[in-house]
Amino acid sequence: MYNSPYLRQNTSVRRVMVTVLVAMLPAIALQVWLFGIGLLLQIAIASATALACEAAMLSLRRRPVARALGDGSALVTAWLIAVCLPPLLPWWMIVIGTSFAIVIGKHLYGGLGQNPFNPAMLAYCVLIISFPALMSQWPGLQGSDAATQLDWVLGGERVLDAVTGATPLDALRTGLLGNADVSAVMQSAAFGHLGGAGWEWVALAWGAGGLLLLALRIITWHIPVAFLGAMSLVSGVAWLIDPSHHASPAFHLLAGGTMLGAFFIATDPVSGATTPRGKLIFAAGIALIAWLIRAFGAYPDGIAFAVLLLNICVPLIDIKTQPPVFGHKVEPPEGGTR
Amino acid sequence: MITALIVMAGLALVLGATLGAASVLFKTQGDPLVDKIDAILPQTQCGQCGYPGCKPYATAIAGGDADINQCPPGGDEGVRKLADLLGREYKPLNAEHGIEKPKSVAVIDEATCIGCTLCIQACPVDAIVGAAKQMHTIVADLCTGCELCVPPCPADCIDMVPVAETVDNWKWRYPVFELKVQPATLPAKEAA
Amino acid sequence: MLSKLFSFNGGVKPDPNKSLSTREPIARLALPPQLVIPLHQHIGGTPRPLVSVGDKVLRGQRIGAADGNVSSAVHAPTSGHVVAIEPRPMPHASGLSSPAVVIEPDGQDIAIEREPFDWHAAAPGEIRDFLRDAGVVGLGGAVFPSHLKLNPGKSGHTDTLVINGAECEPFITCDDMLMRAEPGNILRGALIMQRMLAAKQVLVALEDNKPEAAVALKAAAQALGHASLEVVVVPTRYPAGGAKQLIRVLTGIEVPHGSRSTDFGVQCFNVATALAVWRALEHGEPLTRRIVTVTGNVERPRNFDVAIGTPISHLFAAAGLKPDTDKLIMGGPMMGIPLPNIDAPVVKATNCLLASSPTLFAPPEPELPCIRCGECARACPADLQPFELYWHSRARNFGRAQEYKLFDCIECGCCAYVCPSHIPLVDYYRYAKSEIWARERDKDAADSARERFEFRNWRADREKEEKAAKLAARNAAKPAVKPTDGAGDAATAADDPKKALIEAAMARARAQKEAVAAKNTDALTPAQQAQIDVAEERRKRASALSGSDAPAE
């Protein structure tokens, strides 16, 4: 038995998830082109792990497996994990991260729609806390050949040479700790025109994918605008006050996970704020904490921690930012209500 | 030393006075807990809990003399609400006090009624009208379905009739969707 | 001239599917062999039946009188005989029955003689009473008695009278066709309403997907030549025809749930209601017919002018119900209710009858978990957070659902329309609302039971005191009577006479019944004898019980 409305728009969760995957393609393609096929291997491993874990958890929870697997949410989580990790991690780290995200981050909380934390960011945090050294090795722009990359991902001996290097954010914080000033650090090889060598183009590709999501009405403007706006504002103020110790807003917008976070991570509807004002506060909060961690914290990038911290605040943010209901925006005239 | 003693004593005096004033100023009338419990109870006044009415049972719960699972008309939901209010563990209805039944009202078979007024005296909520040697009638809207009028009736003329569902009290069902969508029944064909 | 239109948030744009039923003009449907006229067809009290079985009724004769002022009358749509007054299945999602007057038309269609009523000279109060007794209620679907709304209230005047011809829901075209057919009389009805409400302006609003109706109305407005009367075309967006949404679009005013729009200087009526007012006042015709769109999975979709009380099967027969129909709907595809019974009658609220087939309205895909995507919140015309309402309704957490303003939900269905998880959101709201109403009924009943219980206890205490006082007085006055008896004996003495009295009453009753029985036991059929035997048996059992059980009490 079902009742009105009998008309329904042609839409589905699967469609939403597939659109998100499509929007990720430009940045993935660019990253592969600039830094090699390591990322593709990573995506493959993460996807396989995510689907296997999802299927296992669904059958353990006695849910219809085929239907839930088909919704595509596990794939989105897997792809997000793969793109936010350094591209040449050994396979078992990706498996650990992805299975943690799906099993503990998602299904132990009740599955799709119930998880309070962004599963991909949970995976990232677990890995960076457990394996800090491996998590800070990023390939340089020159790249290595596909065979070496494959060998590395399969767990072969890792030789720290020219092909790996620190990320720009990491180089910046190491440099600043060594009492160098920003402009001196920026001379090093890790830095390109704006963000990091090559990475700024990938960041712009994430932004392009995000604009696609906006155009298709998968996300609203609130979170990206508040995220990027708050990030520019705080980093800009710090940069104006002390340019020798703080990088420019342009650097912060294009380095690390800012763009990916603003359009793909913070916009996760399940773990994010839902009201328009709440979304602004949520995203601005992430940007602020991420910048604080970048500028003063112990980790080079703080998006993941910031997202998790703001995820905890979502219920409070949502309750405090409920939009006014129709007819309740202004006080009714005297004697108006019963 | 002396100063410390004076300060502490003064503090104690001030706080004591404040508390005393507050207890006078914000004095609550009656026991709010009993009223809160009473508000949850269905007011059937049936006495199945072992107390002569809902208020006495509420008082007994508040005083710790009675358990929260002794009210069959309140049902499972009533027990849950009481458990919530009192911060106690939920427990299923105690079968000793009866089982949860669909809401019913008493109906007098007017042909058999002898007009003895015993049911009128038994009714805790004044839902029966009639006078001595006159036939009695139960006002269905006022009847709580407590069944207290049934045993005293010497003519055995009172029946408990479940309240029928009407257009006015019909409720939309909880949406339950089968995993597989089945073709809906076809009213047109049935009618044809 | 209305220079500026406002807008409401949310809304959706489903395929209108209106052209299906506008190809043919309105057809007057022949009378069925039996008319079933429910007594309760509107918001408010159930009318009292004024006829009895066997009575002859005439067209326009009042067969049910308004029960109080918040009610409305019902009338016979044709002449004929009352064959039954009994519960019949209603066009209601429950399929349950309600009292109805069943009339068999005699085919002569003789009208009742009209009492002349000069509305030009009558006071507004008299007009309101007349409309109540003419059974005029809102024909847009809410069936609220119109005379109650035709009251400007304390201020004595109204700013804007909105005549709602928006008809935003897909498939429905009854208002559209009515506006094309009788634009002049709709506007004349609106002008009467304007007079009653002392309204400064009258805005007749319709969506821009009804150009023919707009042309007809504008021409009629020009012919009438009232400066304060204006036909306004509003953008097509569901649910622009919701009274609150339309008022917002035209005036910018938001009327909150639970408030009367008159308090904000606005009043809103459906176009068909305006016509019904005109017909009732000018021609003395009570509301006994209405236009019904029959569409969807039928061979010949069109609009019918139908006598209220016509079985729905009769309309579908006229339109040709296709065999693969799986479901019948009263109303449109967004807000319509399922009809479990095809023999239920057309009532004043029936604007559309929609036949559904699996190809026309595909059964929903299985419900998936809510991903909080917020599409529903963006589509909600009441600015609610539907997923929060869903969350709490699903968890049966009704208090929280009400905090999120569940009762501001107009059940328009926009949220479920856009939901990517295919959640039947509106079903959850309907469930939560009816549970809350049931709880409120239970709570009111419990409160009144508590009051009566406490009053009864107080009365019992007082009687006990009075009895004790009387007894004390008597004892004091007659100290000679058994001075040795204690208080315990006094109590049994008070009890015993009562028991004796009851025994005496039982005996009397037995004697009386025997006496009565003795009088007519001469010529008994076997069936009667058997019945008497059963009764005697029961009586014996009763007296046996009274002998054993009753004194124990």
Image (cartoon, coloured by chain):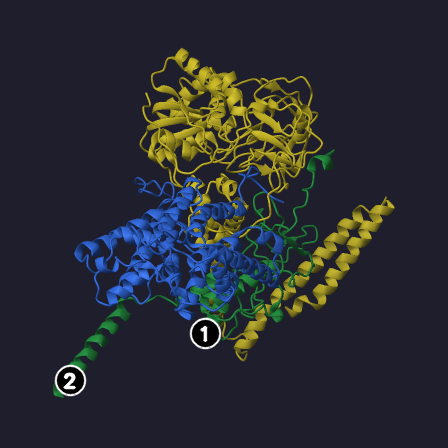
Chain colours: A blue, B green, C yellow
Q: Which mark is residue B63?
A: 1
Asked if A39 appears above or below C526 in the picture, the reply is below
Quarter of the image that includes the N terminus of chain C: top left
Q: Are marks 2 and 1 on the same chain?
A: yes
Asked if A267 appears above or below C346 in the picture, the reply is below
User: Is residue C38 at all visible to an observer of this figure?
Assistant: yes
Viewed as shown, does residue A33 lie left or right of A45?
left
Q: Position of residue C218 (x, y in %)?
A: 42, 16
Image-quadrant location for residue B86: bottom left
Residue at the spot of label 2:
B4
Question: The numbered mark 1 sits on a residue in which chain?
Answer: B
Q: Mark 2 or mark 1, which has the lower sequence index?
A: 2
Q: Position of residue A76 (x, y in %)?
A: 49, 53
Q: Check disc 2 and give the amino acid type.
A: Ala
Of all residues, the one furthest to the left in this rendering is: B3
Q: Position of residue B136 (x, y in %)?
A: 62, 52
Q: Pointer 2: residues within 10 angstroms few (<14), some, or many (20+)? A: few
Q: Position of residue B92 (x, y in %)?
A: 58, 68
Question: What residue lies at 61% left-to-right and 18% top-to-bottom?
Answer: C27
User: Is residue C467 at all visible to an observer of this figure?
Assistant: no
